[in-house]
Image (cartoon, helix red, strand yellow):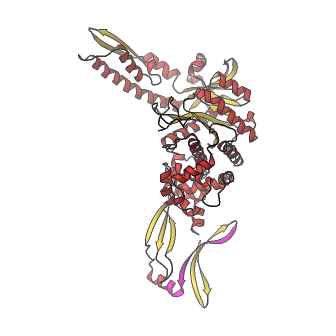
Amino acid sequence: MASLIAKKKGNQLYYYVVESARVDGKPRIVHQTYLGSAEKVAALVKDRTAPLPLSASARDFGLPGALWLSAQQTGVWALLESLWPASRSGPSPALYLLLAAIHRICQPGPKTEVSDWYRGTILHSLWKVSPERFTSQAFWDVFEQILPAHLDPLSPHEDPLDHAQLRLLGVWKHQQMVSRRLLSYDTTNFYTYIASTNTRNHLAQRGHNKQGRHNLRQVGLSYVLDGEHGVSLCHHVYRGNVADAEEFSTALARMLTLLDRNHIARDTVTLVFDKGGAALANTVQLEEAGVGWISALPWNQAPAQFRERDVEQLPPCSSVQPGVRAAAEKFLVHGQEYLCVVKYSASFAGEQLHSLTTSLSKVLQSLRRFSMELNKPKARWKEQQIRSKIQKWLNAQFLEELIRYQIQQRDGRWRLQFDFDTAAWQRLVTHRLGRTMLLTNRMDWTAEQVAVGYSAQQEIEKVFRGLKDGDWLGWGPMYHWTDRKIRIHAFYCMLGISLLQHVHKQAQAAWEGISVEQLLEELRHMQQFVLLYPPQGEKGPNRIATVLSKQTLPQQALAQTLGLDQLHITQRG
């Protein structure tokens, strides 16, 4: 609350407007503005006008400020500084890593843009580090210190980044952000623009790219996050030509090491992964490791009578899972008895139905146009070309079951006939859409517990979408071209995801049910304006005042919950 006080200097009283707040539980003056003598105050009151500012500038406040507070509050910043302390001159490598992580969330781009972006944020005012320190060359030099060239970038022994992952897991465990129930695992890959002639890079290889860029070299990423809180627990960057099933063994060994060193009992953990990892060799490894697991089961591996059970025969779940039904039975799979669960989701069925009808409409129209094209007198098509073209259209899920076609050659021309299989459509709608088959070694769990547990897999899929679309944190564009720099890039990207998830967890107290996208939208619109005023008298420097942009009610609640309002007062004081 603002108040007016007088200070006596010599025989003259001078007046100040002060703002007080509690600091460490004690009232302290956190900001004061000089007004002048009684005559000047009277003149201001009489004039009833405030001086006009000479200039005003805006800087990003909400999002970088919230991420910086998160790094401080969780102990992440203290840990990074202990791992990579500052030298006698210049910022610490830890500050470069944290800045890179925050920059990837706020405004993804190359390191050449970091300096200008940093200059226009609250971080410049808080850190008091010159923007000229954060050049592209400076980042390169610092990254060389973090992961020196003499270390094998693919060796897990004495690796600084692996050691940092281990210590970070301890931080999140201390913050109670690691549940002992659900850990989600999945893999993905990211294409790069690394030239084919670059023989110094071994991570970037050609393979099946999940974004469809098969012509480019790619790197793979295996990732483990907490299924309840969403923080990154373990990640591994691997060669782009390694199959997901082959990577599973490496990722599992790394995860078990982290669990053991942080004294997290293996039997308390349940690993959740999709059907891509549900291979026999993987389930055997999990049983030997003593870890609980839930996996999606390929449709053709589930017993037909169980997987096609009528929806009405599946018991509905509680209100925690609205529109979901699930049933469980024990079956022999991979030579051992496991609990098999069939899960039906009405919303998932609706999404699949919408996608399928859209695809059907497009493919049927394409087949009709293609049939007319084959009838043209100058058409010169070979049978293999026709079948290859049609097969590309039918590659989408379920289309090959629903559309039947025939090609015949008459009078030197190819004739295409196609039809829609209504019986197959009825079977699909009744016994397939909306269903997911699950497999687990948690034999004492109910069907609903397994269904709820597998829903944690959605969290890791959201992260991957956020990384590739840039809605959460932009993995790309990645301009690094050496293995070591790519691994550091992955490290600070995963660090940024953890900080963002922690902020999101805090924001739930102010706005229950807020999504990460909504949180980012609100925080990005919170800016701080720096106003430059003329001197109070004839002499003296120009005065500076800061004010926040007008806030909506959600922004006010977020500012109070995340500590941004206190950050503004402290920074201003």
**From what the image shows, is residue 520 above or below residue 212?**
below
Quadrant hosting residue 150: top right
344 is within the stretch colored magenta: no
Q: Is residue 409 visible?
A: yes
Q: Quadrant of the N terminus?
A: bottom right
Residue at image point 60% right, 91% down: 11
Quadrant hosting residue 53: bottom left
**From what the image shows, is residue 70 above or below residue 335?**
below
Q: Is residue 441 visible?
A: no
Residue 286: horizontal and vertical position, in percent?
70, 28
Q: Quadrant of the C terminus?
A: bottom right
Q: Is residue 212 left or right of residue 307?
A: left
**Farthest-out residue, top:** 411
**Farthest-out residue, left:** 377
**From what the image shows, is residue 119 above or below residue 188?**
below
Residue 4: horizontal and vertical position, in percent?
58, 79
Residue span colored magenta:
23-42
Residue at image point 61% right, 51% down: 506
Q: Main secondary structure of the magenta part?
A: strand
Residue 146: horizontal and vertical position, in percent?
63, 48
35 is within the stretch colored magenta: yes
**Farthest-out residue, bottom:** 11
Residue 492: horizontal and vertical position, in percent?
59, 46
Viewer-proximal residue among 437 and 278: 278
